[in-house]
Amino acid sequence: MNGGDRIARVLQSFGVKFLFTLCGGHISPVLKGAKDLGIRVVDVRHEATAVFAADAVSRITGIPGVAAVTAGPGATNTITAVKNAQLAQSPVVILGGAAATLLQGRGALQDIDQMALFKPHVKTARAVKRVRDLTPAIQEAMQAAQSGVPGPVFVECPVDLLYDEKVIREWYEAAAPRATGLSNRVMRAYLNRHVHRLFAGADAVESPAAEVATPAPSRRAIEHAAQRIASAERPLLIVGSQALVDAREATATAEAIESLGIPVYLSGMARGLMGSSHPLHRRHQRRKAIREADVVVLAGVPSDFRLDYGRHVRKSACLISANRSRIDLNRNRRPDIGAIADAGLFLRQLAAALGIDASARWEEWRTTLLARDSEREAEIDQMAERSGEFINPVSLLRAVDAQLPADSVIVADGGDFVGTASYILKPREPLCWLDPGVFGTLGCGAGFALGASLCRPDHEVWSVFGDGSVGYALAEFDTFVRHGVPVIAVVGNDGSWAQIAREQVKMLDDDVGTVLARSNYHLVAEGLGGHGILIKHRDQLEAGLQEARDAAGNGLPVLINTWLDKTDFREGSLSM
Ligand SMILES: Cc1ncc(C[n+]2csc(CCOP(=O)(O)OP(=O)(O)O)c2C)c(N)n1
């Protein structure tokens, strides 16, 4: 068994089903080892896509997704996606190839200081130096990614640890000087000893990895929170991605929220947790609701810019917060009751502590919020009616929402159009919405859609793009076709990087750098073997969307290029 096989065996023992990669000579044995063990090797067209896809797998399955990239440029190409995973607290494992141990720092091909590159962006970074350390290093990486505050980890695996000892021995022998003479004999002995050290103890018995514990709240925090909620008049619950870290507990967490009976706003991976139209789930006017609440429960949500740094919550209100991160728990505003714990587990224990079904509680408060939601929906309906030369984004997204099957997964990658989509598209189930999170990274869409589609092969995966953001995704239609991944991409083509243009034109009266052509993105998808659809007018919508679903049903990825009405930025935009 070579080093590549060893790595694959650990991945398999953790339940890893996919290895995302873009090949390189430094990592070939890892790919071969994975394939031999039945781990599906998914080769993409940019290393960032490999990490985004691994990130999606982590979020959807709760098992860290894994990407293997080659040394040097392969590794540097991942950094944006790694940073995104760090800020989204996604447990991703990145396996990096590296120059042979003895050549590092001597000007070998693609040999850079990868540890310095990764360290600021990952939970742990480890450079493995001996074959016998490969298994524990990968075990520790898989555990570190999931424990406490989840996040990416990096393991550097030099190429001379990955091949059979015989191959490496021959390789070092071939590199050694053949001539006689003392210095040459010393050099040969040195190389010999080095190979010996690389492989020493490689056959020792390896121990299985320990389970990763879910951080639990203290009983005191649960009792205290339960008491405070029981006496609340207008409690509000805000649930974020972190409550879904333990993806396998999603349904139990949704049941707990139902039993708590508190009106709830969902964000990030928590969207869809309560289905598309649960009576407790509120979608609009969140800021106003927070301002009015007398008890606010933040489940896996920090008081960052999205909550105006904690200022949305009234000073007199009781702030209850559960977060795996001590820093996020106390960020900007210290909660009155805080639990450093898994937010999903916190909610489940809180529901158990409050006991009996709470469906009759806070009737008036719930009705008030419901009425506001209905009002806002009516306004959105009116916006959908407005017509222009091409398609109004609101009406387009309303039509998409109407077609979405119950179990479809939605991926969001873009600016204004995607912002509008986040108001209008209603994920139907838990773990069916993927967006980049706080890093706001354009370019996550293709990788997310790839990972989601592989994890959920029976579900439709709809990826919503701006015409700007889709530029990062186009080459991956080749990946979708080769791997039979029938993603449906909806591109809101307004000939602009609109979210930026909107502010720039207002502030500087110049759209420089923000103008795009209404390009034929659908033809790119077709050229790569997918199915392309162009929709310019409202009356083509329903048929076009149905055509997309039919093509995806036949296993083809689809790109729907929809021409949106151009926003006059001096007049204000249609999006919300
Ligand atoms: C990697 C990256 N580069 C640049 C940005 C800045 N940015 C945020 S939104 C946006 C415009 C997005 O345009 P598009 O995808 O066409 O969507 P639209 O706003 O037009 O609907 C840009 C460039 C970013 N968030 N991420």
Image (cartoon, rainbow, N blue to C red):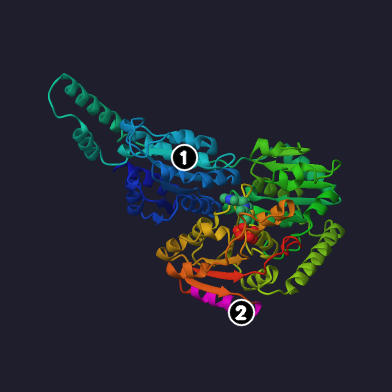
In screen coordinates, is 281 left or right of 108? right
Q: Residue at x 31, y 30 (%)?
A: 102
Q: Secondary structure at mark 2?
A: helix
Which quadrant of the figure has residue 529? bottom left
Q: Label 2 vs label 1: CA separation?
A: 47 Å
So how many labels did they put on this image?
Answer: 2
Is residue 325 or residue 333 the one in the foreground? 333
**In the rendered structure, which amino acid carries the disc numbered 1?**
Phe
Q: Quadrant of the C terminus?
A: bottom right
- In percent of width and height, residue 68 lies at 41, 47
Contact, mark 2 vs mark 1 (Cβ under 8 Å): no
Where does residue 358 sit, x and y in percent of width and height?
78, 56
Q: Mark on residue 154?
A: 1
Res 527 → quadrant: bottom left
Please, what is the three-letter code of the amino acid marked with disc 2?
Answer: Gln
Q: Residues within 10 Å of mark 2 (few under 14, many from 20)?
A: few
User: Residue 484 location, x and y as percent?
Assistant: 43, 66
For the residue carrying disc 1, how many other residues have a C-alpha within 10 Å: few (<14), some (14-19), or many (20+)? many
Q: Which mark is residue 145?
A: none
* Ligand 1 quadrant assignment: bottom right
Q: Which residue has dot 2 on it?
A: 540
Q: Quadrant of the N terminus?
A: top left
- Chain part drawn in magenta: 538-551
Q: Nearer the viewer, residue 190 or 325?
A: 190
Pick the residue in front: 137 or 502.
502
* Mark positioned earlier in the residue sequence (2 or 1): 1
Helix, strand or loop under label 1: strand
The majority secondary structure of the magenta stretch comes to: helix
Q: Residue at x 68, y 75 (%)?
A: 389
Left or right: where 245 falls relative to 192: right
